[in-house]
Image: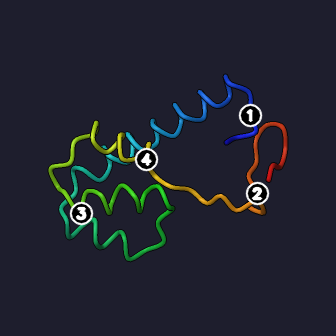
Amino acid sequence: RLDLGSTAKLRTLVTYLDIIGELYDKYSVKSPSEIRYEMKGQLDPLSRFVASALLTDSKLSLTTLLDRAMERRYSASPSERFFTGGGVHT
């Protein structure tokens, strides 16, 4: 549960799915060896998620990836902090 208004939650979801789509566009045109090479570096969690998914299934469609992205689990730690326009939240 995000401590945000309903419009902000929708914007957050749309932005998240847009980022996943952009990463899909970036990695879906790369060969498995190119993806593996990039994964040796420091990838952010979303890039790692998309790259790993495409390594597992090179024929993965964007629709399927977006469905998987919606099912991802996130930390429920009450001490995890994140920033919004309203400041820091836990």
The residue carrying pointer 2 sits among few (fewer than 14), some (14 to 19) or many (20 or more) residues within 10 Å by Cα, namely few
User: Position of 40 compared to 53: left or right?
Assistant: right
Q: Residue furthest right?
A: 87
Q: Quadrant of the N terminus?
A: top right
| Mark 1 or mark 3, earlier in chain | 1
Q: Residue at x 24, y 50 (%)?
A: 28
| Mark 2 or mark 1, earlier in chain | 1
Spatial CA distance of label 1 from label 3 is 35 Å
Residue at disc 1, secondary structure:
loop
Amino acid, disc 2: Arg
* Nearer to us: label 2 or label 4: 4
The residue carrying pointer 4 sits among few (fewer than 14), some (14 to 19) or many (20 or more) residues within 10 Å by Cα, namely few
Q: Nearer the viewer, residue 55 or 41?
A: 55
| Mark 4 or mark 1, earlier in chain | 1
Mark 2 = which residue? 81
Query: Residue 23 location, x and y as percent?
Result: 38, 48
Spatial CA distance of label 4 from label 3 is 18 Å
Mark 3 = which residue? 55
Quarter of the view holding residue 75: bottom right
Q: Residue at x 76, y 59 (%)?
A: 78
Mark 4 = which residue? 71
